[in-house]
Amino acid sequence: MKESVVQVSCGGPEYGTEEAVEYQKRAFRFMKRIGVFQLSVGFIAFVSAIGALVCGFMVETINYPVIDIFPLLTSVLAVLAGYFALKTARCTPQLQVDAPTKRYVIIHYVIDVTNVSFASCSAAFAGWAIGVCKSTDVKMISYCNPNHDTILIFGIINCVAGAIIAITCIPGMIFFCIYARVFGFTNREDRVRDLENRINNLQRQLENQRPPPYDIDEAPPSYQNNGFKY
């Protein structure tokens, strides 16, 4: 007797069911919220990153980390993540998810996975720049003059924005684990189960469609040799 095995898979209910469609609706609502937030924070961070770079090139002594490209890179990725999250949110729930919807989900996930590291580095280096500008050392202060206060403000904004962007990337990554299955993305357990179902269906078809009995008198010529029939 074949033992039944219950398998629990990350990613929601089985793909192609009405329950999966309901999960997609929840997923789209979630993506709309996170998309608006990422787009807003990314835009603010982008303006701050541009301002910090402009002021950074006007200092007496150009030096890192006062001039840092990480805030700009992080903000651009955050804007892109928000854009693709909103593109996903505008899609229609379907039993068979179309290619554009899957593409938007994957792109948003990849951006979040990439940007969580960049945003963390951006926040850390911005904090380093704040420490440089608040230093009492004359040489250190020259890295931030003549726009000392402006660079300090931009540094604080970049530090906070980088931390917020890194935090918002985490729900984006968790989203894929929670809802991946309802969008047609399968894991190893799903593929094994699908293969087992196909094999079982094939076995049932073979059992239900038995071939007719073979008549030896009607054997094809290829099975006849020297007048004998097999």
Image (cartoon, helix red, strand yellow):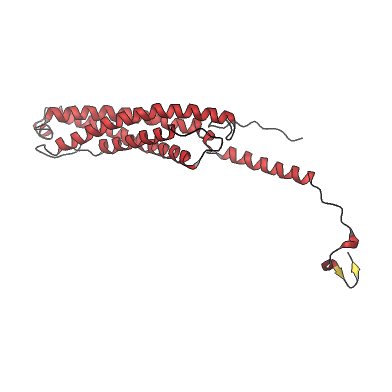
| Left or right for 6, reference 60 | right
Give left or right: position of 108 versus 19: left
From the image, which quarter does the N terminus lie in? top right
Above or below, comparing residue 57 to residue 23 in the picture: below
What residue is drawn where x is 11% and y is 30%?
Answer: 137
Q: Position of residue 142 (x, y in %)?
A: 10, 34
> How many dots with numbers?
0
Residue at image point 22% right, 38% down: 68
Relative to residue 10, is residue 218 drawn left or right? right
Q: Quadrant of residue 153?
A: top left
| Residue 150 can be seen, yes or no | yes
Where, quadrant-wise, is the C terminus in this rendering?
A: bottom right
Q: Residue at x 41, y 40 (%)?
A: 107
Quarter of the rendering containing residue 226: bottom right
Q: Residue furthest bottom?
A: 226
Q: Is residue 200 above or below residue 7?
A: below
Q: Position of residue 35 (x, y in %)?
A: 38, 30
Q: Position of residue 4 (x, y in %)?
A: 70, 32
Q: In x, y percent, where is residue 207?
A: 79, 44
Left or right of residue 92: residue 112: left
To which quarter of the image does residue 3 belong?
Answer: top right
Q: Is residue 66 visible?
A: no
